[in-house]
Each structure stands twice: as C-alpha cells, then as structure tokens.
Amino acid sequence: MKPLTAYDKHAGKPYLRWTANERMQHWLLAGSFIILAVTGFALKYPQAWWVRPFFGPEWLFDLRSLLHRIAGSVFTVLGVYHFYYMVGTLRGRQLLAAFRLRMQDLRDARQNISFNLGLRKAPPAFDHFNYTEKFEYWALIWGAFIMTGTGLMLWFEETTMRLLPRWVIDLLTVIHLYEAWLATLAIVVWHFYAVIFSPQTYPLNTSMLDGRMSEAEMLAEHGLEWEALKAGMKPQSAEQDETADLRAQTGPSQSLCVDDHGGD
Amino acid sequence: MPGTIRLLLVLSYVVPYGIACSPPTLYGQSACLECHSEPDLTMQNEQGNEISLFVDATQFARSVHADFDCTDCHSDLSGSDHPEGHFAKVECGGCHEQALEAYQKSVHAAALTTGASDAATCTDCHGKHDILSPSNPESRTHPLQVAMTCAACHSDAKIVKKYAIPIHDPLGAYRNSVHGAAVLSENNFSAATCYSCHKSHDIRALGDPSSSIYWQNVASTCGRCHAKIYHQYSSSIHGKAVARGIREAPTCTDCHGEHGVASHENPASPVHPLRVSSTTCERCHASELITQRFGISDSRVSTFEDSYHGLAIKGGSLAVANCASCHGIHNILPSSDPSSTINSANLQQTCGTCHKDVTENFVKGSVHLTASTTPGRVVQAVRRFYIMVIIAVIGMMVLHNAADFVSKARRILAQRGDE
C-alpha cells in the first residue's frame, strides 16, 4: 500500500462517515435550498439577467411561486424530521454530541488560523466534526428556523396581518431576504470551499455520494478521531451493512466513523 | 322639435344659398367640359410651371356639386369670352359661410396669413371637383379616410420638420390606437377620429386656451364620448387640480397618451396593470420636482416596488395589486377624503377586493412604509443590521478560507516536491 499523504485523498481504507439516511437528508436539503434560492431571488430581482428570460407570461411567475412553496414545504418537513432524527435516534444523539460546541473549538480555530498564517508549526488535529463544520451546522439550524418561520408567516400573510401589525410584513420580508443572502453566501463561500475548492478536496468531497471517507482524508481532516480509532479507544466494527452496524452500536462512546473494509 | 320648425330652419339656410348659387347660364357644364375633359389640357401658371386644366367629368358627376355649373364656383368668369390668363381662387365660403367663419379662427388660417403656404385650405381636405359628402365612405372627410387626409401633411416628415410640429406621426400612432382600430378595422364610426377631438374647420393650436385640446379642455373633449369617466375624473384630486390651473396635474392624455391611446388590456399601454405603476404614476409620484413642490411623498413608487405587489408585477403577475387597484383610476382622491378608496373607513372593502376576511387589524398601519415612522425605522434598522452582519460574517469567511487555501496549497506543492 502507498504511504498515506494528505493530498492523495483516496489512499488508505475507507471509513463510513454518512449513512444513507443522512445522505438522503443532505440531498433533499440541497435540492430544496437551491430551488428556494433560485425562485426566491427571482422574485426579488426580476430584472436580473438570469431572471428576465423566464418572466413574461403570468404562468411562469405562478410556477415560480408554486415551486418556492413546494420546496419550502420539503425544507420544513425535512427540518422537522431532522429534529426527530437528531433527538429521537441513537445515531442522531451521537451526531448531536459530536456537534456540541466546546471551548476546544475556539482553541482549534485560533490554532488553525495561526498555522495558516505561518504563526504555528503544526495544524491542530480535529475530532469527528471540526470547528468549521460545527459552525456551518449551527448556522444552518439558525437559518432554517428564521427562514421557515418568516417564510410561513409570509406564505399565510392574510393570517399574519389579521393577528399582527401590518409593518410586521415589511419586517418579515426584510429578514427573509437578508437571511437568504446570508445563507446563500455562506453556502457558496464556506460550504463550497470545504467540499469543493479546498486544495485537499478538489474537485469534490464525495462522502455525501457514497458515505465514505478515505483513511488519508481522515488523517488530514480528522486526525484526532483517526488516532482514537487506530489506538482502539473507540471500538471499530467491520464488514457490515450500514444500518445493521448502526443498530449494533450502543453506547455514546461508539465511533461515528466506522471502518468500512468493503472498499479494500 | 316639431318637424315644421325644423324644416323651416333648414330652408332658412338652404333657400337663400340656393338662390345665390342658382347657375347663371353663360357657361354650362357641357360647354366647359368640351375642352376640360381632355386629360392633356395644360397651361403655364405665373411661376412658369405647367399645370393641368383637366376636370374628370365622371368624378365631377359623382360629386356633391354635380348639379352646379362651373361658373357657380368659378364666378369671376364674366363676359362672353373665355378668359385669358388665370381665374381667381374659388371662394367656397361664398356658400359655406359658417365653415369659412370657423376656418378663419383655425390654426391653419393663422398659419396661412403668416406665409405658411402649405397650410391646409378647403381643397386640401375636401378635394376640388371630386368632393363627396362626408357620409360617403370614399369621401376624404369620412371617418375611414380623414386620418389619411390629415396625415398627408401631419405625417409628412418634411412638413412636420419645416413647421416644427411637435407630433411627428399622428397617423402611425392612431392606426394602432383603440380609436383607430375601431374606426378603420371595425367600421365603428362613432369612435374618435381626428376631428372628434380637434374639431373640423375650427382646429386650434395646442396653446390656445379656446382649443379643444388645450390642456385644461382635454378632459371635457374626451368627456364628449366618455361622459361617466369625465364625471368621475372632474371630482378627483387630479381633475380638481387641473381645473385650478396646476399644470403638473394629469389630464386624460398624460396617462393614456393621445393619438396612440390604447386599451388598458394592451400590454403596450402605459396604463396596462403591469406598466401603470412604473410608467405612468411613477412619472409624477417619483419626480423630485413635483413631489417637493406639492409636499407629497416621493417614496410611494419605491415602497410599492419593494413590496410583494410591486415585485410580483415586475415578474408578470396580473393577479396582484397595482397603484390603481387601491387608489382608484379616474376617481383618485386623497386618503383624507371620506369617499376615497383608501380612506380608513373604506380600506377593508378596498383590500377585501382581493384578500379574504379583511379585519380591522389587517388594514391598520401604513402600506407605503417609510423611515419617517417608528415601525419604518425599526425595519430600516433591521435591514442595516443584517447588511453589516452579512459583510462581517461573509468577509471573515472569505479571509479564513483564503488563508486556508494558501496554506493547504503550499503544503501540497511541498509534498509533491519531496516525492
């Protein structure tokens, strides 16, 4: 076997990072997010070059409205399901624990930035989720609450206006717009960098396609977890189908990344 | 009016003229036409140009003057000899006194006296030996033809330029207008043609306060046909302002255009639901000069365009409200007026035109929210806060990832170098 290097991202044995259920959640989120962004910004910027060709006949505008509401409904139902998944399943509770913000994340951020600026010799080693991933996850949860809440109140604007002062509509519109900008820019700048444009990752982090992450990637991105797995501090299970394996896992000390020798 | 009185009135006009114009017999028609029915008959005029002396006997026989003798009009033909040289210009006014009197007050007559040789006289519009009754569809002055008759000069680029006539192609606009289509394509001759608005002989200049198209008279001119709308408009804020001499206030043509006036259902019309806010109301209600001068809000259009209604209209939705949906069309009144559609007492009904179960709370508060109110300031503060947050958060993300990119790229290049 070739020695593991940080840039040869396929080297080493694969680990299971995302279950099929989680990957489905991700792509439902991605799909509904993109449709929401496109159909939403199309309303706000009707004169934009990428919008103009589609607007004219009234049915196209109505289709835009319908798509936005369908995607919004998918997004909302997914959000409710995700809450259940994170709280109501063992795997979810393990992920939630791994997403918990700790003081270590601040230290990791400081050390990683210092390293990137050449002020430190070595980068910090990260656990299952590093500080950039935790930041993104909680920003997404925050954004989802804001967008779902304001979106529903604007969808059922007649009810909103019967119950609240009229200017709340203006406020909701402003929040919905700028939160959309924040979310979209964050996806492009933060998420797309992490999973596409980062030099170690380019052209794509494929873990959301097959659920797997190579040993080299584990070493480079999640060194702490890799060490723990190597040292046997976290139990490893092998040769299993994803769900059966997850059912077999019991305690909170179970590893979230599972050795998956199916790729060898 | 009893028939006998009407008959007497008609006769009182016809009989004296009939007597005055009864043909003397020096030259009978047939005598003149013996020579003048020859198509090649010409002579030189005073300028030395060859002019035709041909009279088309068939056309003349069809004309309203068919029963007249040549000398009825060419009345300077006296004596027994055929005159050498030139006849005097025919004076139509000798019989058509009222028409002449009206014509003499017209912009055409005025232009003629200032030396505008192209200005229209009787024959330019009515023809000469071929004059037909205006009720004859082939007549130059029948609704089917009259637009083309006027356009012979008024859509002639050379004449329009020579006399600095501001409207350069009224016929082109009229053809596509709702009036033009009705008259020319649907044979609806009660629809407006040139003389419906401009009058016929008494056509006066735009700036003449007695003109039917003087800005303060436009509404009553249109109102001759559109009486109900005229009535609504006259008591609207715009109508009252025009009556008081406020030139900035719109009259019919300021919103609808004039020669090209189109149905509000025509997507090219300035009052089409998708265009009225951005093309028509906007011209005054977003004008710095007008809004400052009259102390009205300058943000009515911009706040509308930022609202869902405004955005949906830009997206092509005909279902949402435009300016007129709430403010009315010809009956626009300030919200303080109890009969205004946006008076607080009427708002539930106005919003209720589209929205279901409109409660009192639904219509409370400003629709055009500006930063001059507390809620407006709150919304503005939230907007500014968000913009700052976006700049700070996304800015830090860019910096963080730029440093990460450089660092990772260096490490990878260094590792490749080692191998």
Image (spheres, coloured by chain):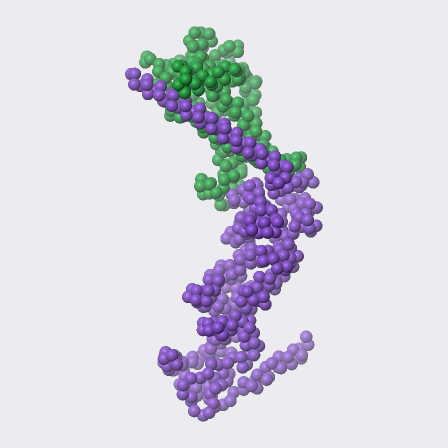
Chain colours: A green, B purple
Say if A33 sits above or below A42 in the image: above
Say if A181 sits above or below B12 in the image: above
Direction bottom: furthest residue: B80
x%, y% of residue B291? 58, 49
Nearer to me, B145 or A226: A226
User: Considering the image in quadrants, where does the N terminus of chain A appear?
Assistant: top left
- Residue A195 visible in the picture: no
Direction top: furthest residue: A232
Q: Is residue B291 left or right of residue A204?
A: right
Q: Residue at x 45, y 29 (%)?
A: A188
Image quarter of residue B226: bottom right
x%, y% of residue B357? 67, 40
x%, y% of residue B392? 50, 28
Image quarter of residue A216: top left
- Residue B44 visible in the picture: yes
User: Considering the image in quadrants, where does the C terminus of chain A appear?
Assistant: top left
x%, y% of residue A59? 51, 43
Say if B278 sits above or below A2 in the image: below
Q: Residue at x 36, y 22 (%)?
A: B409
Nearer to me, B195 or A114: A114
Nearer to me, A27 or B168: B168
Q: Residue at x 43, y 64 (%)?
A: B161
Q: Residue at x 43, y 14 (%)?
A: A125
